[in-house]
Amino acid sequence: MPEVETPLNLPASVTAISGNSNGASIAASILVIDDEAAIRESLEVLLTLEGYAVRMAADGEEGLRILELENFDLVLLDLALPGQSGLELLPQIKERQPELPVIMITAYGTVDNVVDAIRAGAENFVQKPWDNEKLLADIRSAVARHRAEEENLQLKRTLKQRYNFANIVGKSEIMLKVFDLVAQVAPSRSTVLIQGESGTGKELIAKAIHANSPRKDKPFVPINTGAMPSELLESTLFGHVKGAFTSAVASKKGLFEVANGGTLFMDEIATMGMDTQAKILRVLQDRRFMHLGGIQEIQVDVRIIAATNIDLRQAVRDGQFREDLFYRLNVISVDLPPLRARREDIPLLASHFLEFYAAENGLSPRKLSADALRALVDYEWPGNVRELENSIERGVVLSSGPIIGSDLLPGHITGRSFQDALLEHNPNASLFDILEDIERRIIIEKLERCNWNQTDAAEQFHIPLSTLNQKIKRLSIEIRKKGRE
């Protein structure tokens, strides 16, 4: 497994430093708010030796003044302060900088204090006297997450300003090349073929091409060509006249007409039958077609963007795809890398999905613990970005506080075994209850890998769809909406 250079994997002496866009090093900055001079001096020495830029405040009022003037990556906040306590000060800090992580420090760490601090948005709670290595590890994790979140926001702004890309996140060299290619081909009229594994974001790239093209004010019409039989697909694409077939009680426009002047995105194009492929080829060549059952030719101006997770060259060699259509579609090829080939993008993508699903569910901001982020970076991601998105959504929905630990991620990602699952149970649980819960976990994890497509999951389980549906109903498994491409 390739080693990934994220702040969580760097040595302690280096984790305080982060590179900016020009390659220069910028020390992570920490504000310490504590009324004890000896504590401030001790922390200043410890943190400075680790490479952090440190500012000190003796009370809450001074700390808030400094926060108004300077930006920080972390605040170390004492619970017992003169005037306002740390718990009273914490909401004011969060009001000014909601994403700024705060670690509480105190000599009086009661359970109630910990609960109140976490509910108010504290990142962690450290009790005096602390263990230096544990404190530094907590600081490194908090700073790494904060830097990733800030980088994600800046990256999204940059992509929007430069490319008008929506919901596309990535800083890896391989993705930056994809962005440049998309920006270059978007203004043209050329047909584009997007190739990549399932879940890599092919539809998002297609939307980005459309949004940056002269057709952006015209329709973007997506269709999954693998989701319907040939007869229905042709009717959907080309439309039909009344009486063209038994159920054609009225004439209907096809998607080529709906997308006229705009873009038609055809996903899973390798699944089309040969007869349909011939008709698509004619539209690409002549920009003309006829309704099913019709006799009048219709002319359209539609840009085709096709996508596939299958090697079309091999499909041509196997006689499953027309060679002439392949060359018509493959004018410009965009190859999307799997997520495992761009692991440095995982923290940014995770931050993006955390923000999205917390807002969608009306929750306060959520963050990943250090062990959860490590698990995400180390995992192979056969389902790519879609699987990551589903995993983050699961963690957000199941979380009861601001920090999402590895226990809220699917077991196949963290490496938790079924033996671990057994040990998590109440010792008084019956064997039937334990086995039922394990079955539920297996089905949920399979559904997540299949993007909650029950048909695909049943096929992979080698059982009838009706049997899987019965199990879903018996185990009270709530079917979730599919993730975005």
Image (tube, grey):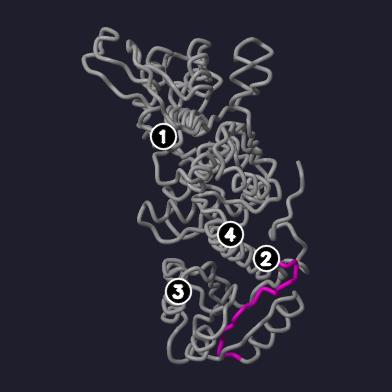
Q: Which mark is residue 137?
A: 2
Which badge, 4 or 1, is on the more N-terminal residue? Answer: 4
Which badge, 1 or 2, is on the more N-terminal residue? Answer: 2
Give the secondary structure at mark 2. helix
Residue labelled with disc 3? 94
Q: Nearer the viewer, mark 4 or mark 2?
A: 4
Quarter of image, res 6: bottom right
Residue labelled with disc 4? 155
Mark 4, Cα crowd under 10 Å, few <14 / some 14-19 / many 20+, is: some
Which badge, 4 or 2, is on the more N-terminal residue? Answer: 2
Q: Are marks 3 and 2 in contact (CB under 8 Å)?
A: no
Q: Is 131 placed left or right of 432 in the picture?
A: right
Looking at this view, is 379 or 265 the one in front? 265
Q: Are marks 1 and 2 in contact (CB under 8 Å)?
A: no
Looking at this view, is 70 or 87 the one in front? 70
Distance in Å between CA atoms under marks 1 and 2: 49 Å
Which badge, 1 or 3, is on the more N-terminal residue? Answer: 3
Give percent across and percent down for residue 396. Answer: 45, 50
Q: Are marks 4 and 2 in contact (CB under 8 Å)?
A: no
Is residue 25 rendered magenta in the image? yes
Give the secondary structure at mark 3. helix
| Range of magenta residues | 22-36
Residue labelled with disc 1? 221
Q: Are marks 3 and 4 in contact (CB under 8 Å)?
A: no
What amino acid type is highlighted by mark number 4? Leu
